[in-house]
Image (cartoon, grey):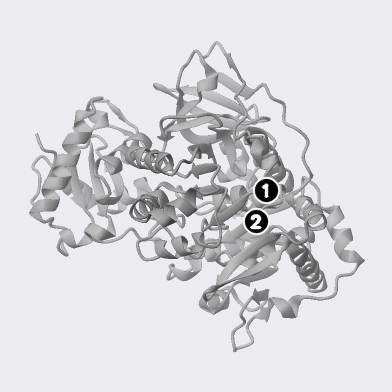
Amino acid sequence: MALQIFSPPAITADQRPDGTVLLSSKTPLGSFPSSVLHSFREGSVRHPDRVLVAERVSDDWSTCSWGQARARVDRIAQGLIDRDVAGRPVLFLSHNSVSYLLMALAAYTVGSPIVPVSPAYSLQSTDYSKLRHILEVCDPAAVFAEDNTYLDALRAIGEQRVLVTATPDTSDVTTPVEALERDATAAVDTAAAAVDGQTVAKIIFTSGSTGRPKGVVNTHEMLAANQQQLRQTWPFLADEPPVLLDWLPWCHTFGGNLNINNVLVNGGSMWIDDGRPTAELIGRTIENLATVQPTLHFNVPAGYAVLLPYLERHPDAARLFFAQLRIAFFGSAALPQQLWERYEALAAQYGSSAGLTTAWGMTETAPVATSAHFPITRSDCIGVPVPGMELKLVPSGSKYELLVRGPNVTKGYYNRPDLVAECFDEEGFLRSGDLCSPVDPSDPNKGLLYGGRIAENFKLSTGTFVTVGTLRPKLLSACSGILQDAVICGHDTDFVSALVWLHPDHAHRVDETGMPEDSLRQDLANALARLAAEGGGSSHRVERLLVQVVPPALDAGEITDKSYINQRVVREGRADQVAELTAAGASARTICRTR
């Protein structure tokens, strides 16, 4: 019997006199456990020998079964109880690892919120300012870091907390995970039984794109509800335990909520990919495919930009990638159309029916709020509300501002009650700050189109509105892999322009001042002409480019810890280059569209 991949959407739309539209699923949300912790504990009894999590150690895989994980989690939980950590936040500085997952589940077990922090705040930052801010807000009782690469950050935090690592240093600053473990007593089961839907599971700090990072409260109900919403839109999850080969960091809601909770709730296996979507590390991912063939693939558009060319050149790797695949999912940004077409061509070549799909959500929605659980043909279609989720579309120019309400939506921010009135409307809907529009106003089942971030968009001097979230992926797609990223500019000027970074494969084509080689100038000028030929007026074409040789800076806020460019901060911080880009006469470094 063939697996049912998607459940058909059944959406109701109610329009108010003021133009506001309310969207929701006619399918009621089914029942779900009070937490993903309880799903894990039950799964450890039902299938103790199944691989829960695995990681590469040198050239071999180290696996941890569900039963082994449960035994160690209970022992670590006892250690946390004995150290008076239970119920108090535990900070995670680390990259993905078996020890990370065991520590997180142990924290859940004793009712401690986990605070996952991007490794970039420890390893790339030079002043630890965001890390110190997070410490001030949540005051963790314990801190976990995988290995000695985090020692400087641990020392900056101070030694008054319980500092835990999987590989301790030689200065006795930290405690090994194994030294924390104790024989589990009845106190562990008692603590786990006390965890309910309203217990805080996570405090996830946003990247701070609009200010200092704020801690989004994720309750256990939010996480459990969101996985039930996903199960009802992807029904095959109930029939086939998911297998993931995944690199996405657990410090973010994508990897740390959507992906790992998918494994915990559906009895699956998480194989931690020590590769990355970079030219230097993609080969490691391909090596890992020889051991595990995923049933689900989750990635960001930049990841597909690196992965797909490799699969096109290596048929053996492509066959392994598609062998068991049910769904290929992209998130965090729109997928450029040329990557979409290349994926579909590869899937057809290897006889795979695994289509591309996406969703929309936020850290505040744990994370999925809408899902494209039906065939789509364009990457800016974010689907329809999942069961139990209500969307409120408030008119904003030619589009709608997107607000959300449901059991997977946060009630607020940690130690910031002052933000409630700012972030929620009078009906309790959370303001997302994102824009959307219906694919077909007469049929809500066709889904919504993503319209970008309100804070990123701007108007030209002509009054024409520029939607950055739509134009940026079109520009990257038109440039066919030459560009790594772009910041769209042109506020109060006559035309759209962009500050751009070259893909590493093309970095040699500019000098240290950003002066492009003639061939690069011609290639990019022609790409801008192709984009303009697609039509759509001045807000849909880019007239000029200026190549950046200085990478975006994390400490300056130009790039978030998710490696996502902060458009507003870059435009403000590089005002001199924006001025050069938008001046009446083009400078020698500026690349102009071919006429």
Q: Would you name the residue on which mark 1 appears?
A: 241
Side of 464 relative to 565 (left or right): left
Q: Residue at x 77, y 40 (%)?
A: 32
Tell me if residue 137 can be seen: no
Q: Quadrant of the N terminus?
A: top right
Q: Specify the amino acid type for callout 1.
A: Pro
Q: Residue furthest top?
A: 17
Find residue 564 and report its horizontal and vertical position in percent. Answer: 41, 51
Q: Which residue is mark 2?
A: 269
Q: Is residue 197 above or below residue 424?
A: below
Residue contact at pointers 2 and 1, CB within 8 angstroms: yes
The percent position of residue 53, horizontal first and vertical second, equals 65, 62
Q: Amino acid at mark 2?
A: Ser
Q: Position of residue 92 (x, y in %)?
A: 61, 65
Q: Residue furthest bottom?
A: 170
Location of the C terminus by quadrant is top left
Q: CA distance from mark 2 to mark 1?
A: 8 Å
x 30%, y 53%: residue: 573
